[in-house]
Amino acid sequence: AQSVTQLDSQVPVFEEAPVELRCNYSSSVSVYLFWYVQYPNQGLQLLLKYLSGSTLVKGINGFEAEFNKSQTSFHLRKPSVHISDTAEYFCAASQGGSEKLVFGKGTKLTVNP
Amino acid sequence: NAGVTQTPKFQVLKTGQSMTLQCAQDMNHEYMSWYRQDPGMGLRLIHYSVGAGITDQGEVPNGYNVSRSTTEDFPLRLLSAAPSQTSVYFCASSYFSGGTQYFGPGTRLLVL
């Protein structure tokens, strides 16, 4: 069964600095990958997804992620963060799109002025 | 298009009480699911449904019951609430089980 590991539970950064949130998954066989964001006291919303094709995926709010099959990773990046990016970010994966979505435990990103 | 709606937003229960958390979607999605979110645990799947009349257990099903009589609705029932069920509950829907999930705003439940 698919599993997802988010390597950092908390990431503090300063405003306008670059950030990378790390995600590793267990199986590359026909994997679908997602990043969701959860702002305080809200539900989750999709940032970006990888289903197939180009390994560099661009999402909303200037975020992007790269699918790396050999490293079984799908790290999320943003070149310059804003205070408004403070939120919890979840990586998720499903195998072949036919299995249930499995979530990582989340990474809390705090952007400081 | 309201997306996924959940009621209530917040609920306080006493141990042993029962209640139903409501979830509805207007996107004609076949797949619906319930998650609970606890600090440091991420989202854990409670129950899911791949279509009307079909439900199955997720990772943490004990103490919860579901049914799916229509495509739109997927209520979650707590049979006899326990303090360990204090959590934030999210309902989600998607076109298929491994696809993009659309989440509701959540129900915050406190069991005393």
Image (spheres, grey):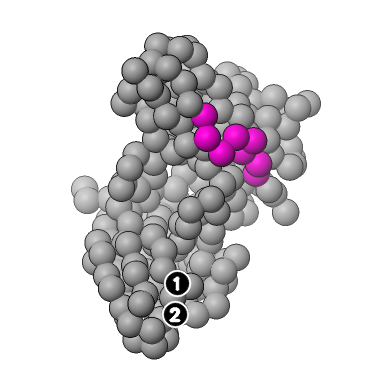
Q: Which residue is mark 2?
A: B82
Q: Secondary structure at mark 2?
A: loop
Give the residue at the far left of this rendering. Answer: B1
Disc 2 marks a residue whose amino acid type is Ala
Q: Is residue A4 left or right of residue A16?
A: right
Identified at 33% across, 42% down, the residue is A40
Q: Nearer the viewer, residue B2 or B17?
A: B17
Task: Tell me if residue B52 can be seen.
Answer: no
Q: Say above or below: B68 vs A22.
A: below
The boundaries of the magenta stretch are: A4-11
Q: Say above or below: A18 vs B19.
A: above
Task: Tell me if residue A54 can be seen.
Answer: yes
Q: Which residue is mark 1?
A: B85
Name the dominant secondary structure of the magenta segment: strand
Question: What is the quadrant of the C terminus of chain A in the image?
Answer: top left
Task: Please say whether residue B96 is one of the residues in the magenta stretch.
Answer: no
Local packing at callout 1 (Cα closer than 10 Å; few below 14, some 14-19, many 20+) is some
